[in-house]
Amino acid sequence: MKFITSVFTSITAVMLLMANYAAAETTSLTPRRLAANSVERSQENDQRQKVQSRIVENGWHKVGTGRWYEGLLTIFDQVDYDLSWEIEIEESDDVDGYYRFIPYHEESPIAGIVGAADDQYFYVDASDPERVICEDFIAYRYFEFNYYFSQLVPENGFYDNDLPGVVEDNVIYFPRNSFGWWADEIGQFLPVNAEGDFKIVLPGGEERPNWKTLGESVFTDGFCGPYFKGEAISTNVTVQERDRRPGYFRLLGAFSQYGSDSPLVIDATNPDFVVLPFQEAGFEHDERGAVVVYSHCENFISPMKYPTAEEYAVAFPQYVATYKNGSIVFPPDACVLHFPDWNPWSFTTNDDAARMSTVAIPTTSGVKNIMTEDNADAPKVYYDIMGRRVDNPSSGVFVVRQGSKSYKVFVK
């Protein structure tokens, strides 16, 4: 029976593995081809990937050109998200919907990154479009460094996991964290496809964009603003939501006032525990280098500290962000600034200077919350972040309606 580590243990393990790879003379993503007299499957690989009974080898026919969206090797820094390329797909003569192809062929970007092409087939059983199962796959199998992946489904021995793919409009979509990568160093499978990027477009398929635009809003930045500008900064943003992942948002233009076009990603899939994932802000501190932002909880949710979000929330309720009544609210100090180039172990929450950070998520029927220059003479009406009208705002973040425009302000 196969097994997979918890998310938090996995993150720690991956960080340790990456550090080991970076320090090694030859990294695991630059494999060297073995000498001709030693190109043999290792006994370990034979045990890890036995040809399963459902693999079809009786005959294949070409069905056309498809597209592979990488979601497995994105665990390595050299492989970008949203990387895709064309693949030539074959279908079994015996089983309709059973496909094979070579993903890391000569023309693939991965071949350029690794320095060599691979000749291993990837097998996909999509005969049941509601339950797509992939065979175990060892990329670069006959190289000194290879990468063993397995889909987390009972058919592959993961009896406590069931994450099949589905076919929609001739595109195979796989859920996030639906595959495991075998890490020899720790003898366990670590989850991959963390962002749900992995998909296979079959010939004639029409894939949906990874992000859909919801509308315009105003983002009040209470973490970078006080640190770099001396006060909370409100910025017009475009709000997008991840396809097939409701509540996972990104704000385009969130850091535009710092000269950055990097989006701000917000994970509000759990509205009672919203998280700012670890991410680069796309601009630099004059002395400390690159700016990274993330939620305070990212430092404390771990097997050695607070194993679950619920335990963290009990210990640090003042840092818990929420998504309620259409608005995401991060309390002061809930968001962390980090300068890895300056000190990889330090972070700051701005302490007394930090302010609340908020953004209203647009709906198809809602009014766009965007600042304009119209109605400058119209009276101002104040509302708190819960949408209640406030006649005499004292301190905090408020939404101001002035004629046909609306925006957020911070009152000291």
Image (cartoon, rainbow, N blue to C red):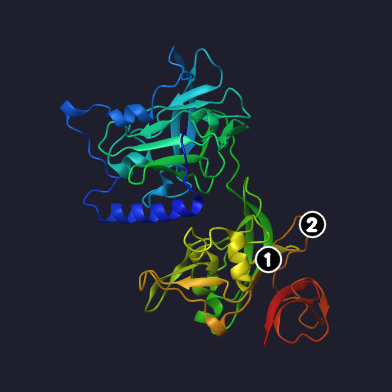
Q: Which residue is mark 1?
A: 217
Q: Dividing the image into 4 quarters, which one contains the C terminus?
A: bottom right
Task: Tell me the quarter of the picture where residue 162 sits.
Answer: top right
Q: How crowded is the residue under tag 1: few (<14 C-alpha within 10 Å), some, or many (20+)? A: many
Amino acid type, label 2: Ser
Helix, strand or loop at mark 1 = strand
Residue 217 in view here: yes
Q: Nearer the viewer, residue 143 or 226?
A: 143
Q: Nearer the viewer, residue 286 or 222?
A: 222
Find residue 201 and report its horizontal and vertical position in percent: 53, 33
Measured along the vertical axis of the image, is residue 342 above or below residue 121? below
Q: Which residue is mark 2?
A: 365
**First along the sequence among labels 2 and 1:** 1
Q: How crowded is the residue under tag 2: few (<14 C-alpha within 10 Å), some, or many (20+)? A: few
Is 3 displayed left or right of 398 in the figure? left
Report how far apart the C-alphas of labels 2 and 1 lie in the structure.
14 Å
Helix, strand or loop at mark 2 = loop
Disc 2 + disc 1, Cβ < 8 Å: no
Residue 261 in view here: no
Find residue 130 and report its horizontal and vertical position in percent: 63, 29
Amino acid type, label 1: Ser
Measured along the vertical axis of the image, is residue 261 above or below residue 229? above
Is 138 displayed left or right of 266 in the figure? left
Q: Residue at x 22, y 35 (%)?
A: 33
Check residue 274 in the rendering and tell me which mark sits there, or answer none.
none
Q: Residue at x 62, y 66 (%)?
A: 313
